[in-house]
Image (cartoon, helix red, strand yellow):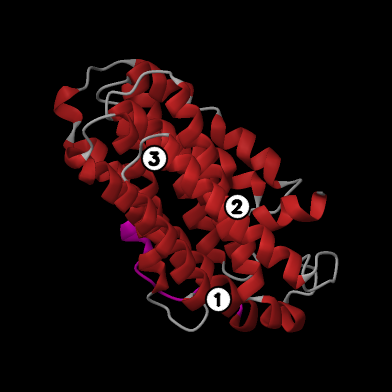
Amino acid sequence: MLNWLHLCRVSNLPTVWSNVLAGWLLAGGAMSPGLCWMLLAGSLMYGGGMVLNDVCDAAHDRQHQVHRPIAAGRVSWKAALVGALAMLGIGLMAGIKADASPWLLVGLLAGIVAYDLYHKPWAGSVLIMGLCRSLLFLAAASAAGPWQELWPQAAALGLYVLGITAVARLEAAAARTGRSGPHLAHLALIAPLLLAIAGSARLSLSAPALLCPLAFVLVVGMALKRMRLGGPQIGAAVGLLLAAMPLVDALALLPDQPSLALSLLPLPIALRLWQRWIAAT
């Protein structure tokens, strides 16, 4: 079971839950069985995508990351493929049960498969990964109510994930060169903060209005500092940036749901602790 948890990278699942919750609430959704179905859909599609990622990378991992469950022989390639396809299929059906837009769900599924197939040879695959998180957010919103006006929040989330994925691609290069090198990921990483600033006209000077942006700046700043150190610190930076993703959702919720935004603040700490048990990347 532990090998499957590693394959699914379950330490990142709370980021999926916060994405779904933010999209659902911003579309006007209430606590209902539909939300539970959407949380299940997001979890299974994320887990299936992560397992499929290892399936597609099996040959590479046998040479460069022999500790991964498939490369080490602890999970067979065929079992992982069947498990990945099952999770993706059941996740799609759960999303339909939640009444999410079928087009957004199919787009999300297509994006997951495309990323897993092409992320190694094509640097532009970072765009697909960002799009996948945007589609997850919008699919959750579509299951709750009108979602068409939530594209700025979805785009900010997608840009942030694009930035994380771009940083993660530097990890292998840094292992060879010892340096991270220049890149444009910094701009994508601050997109959620820019969105929060744009919506600041609707904010009051309350605790969440100040704490959420400050927490986001603090964690992302720590990650950028590690990126500048290069080498193995880039992997640590990726872990920090993944842990900060619930803060992206907090910034999106801030103008309309400040109390809920504040409730997401402890999640990065919990995620960092969880990453000690199951690696985030």
Q: Give the mark nearest the N terminus, 1 or 2.
A: 2
Local secondary structure at mark 2: helix
Q: CA distance from mark 1 to mark 3?
A: 28 Å
First in sequence: mark 1 vs mark 3? 1
Q: As shown in the figure, which amino acid type bears the numbered disc 3? A: Val
The CA distance from mark 2 to mark 3 is 26 Å
Read off the magenta span.
178-190
Identified at 54% across, 37% down, the residue is: 40
Please say whether residue 226 is one of the residues in the magenta stretch: no
- Write down the residue under mark 2: 87
User: Residue 231 falls in which quadrant of the image?
Assistant: bottom right
Position in image of residue 278 (x %, y %): 73, 49
Residue topped by disc 3? 248
Label 1, on which residue?
Answer: 179
Q: Position of residue 135 (x, y in %)?
A: 34, 51
Q: Secondary structure at mark 3?
A: helix
Dominant secondary-structure state across the stretch colored magenta: loop
Mark 2 or mark 3, whichever is nearer to me:
2
- Give the amino acid at mark 2: Met
Q: Amino acid at mark 1?
A: Arg
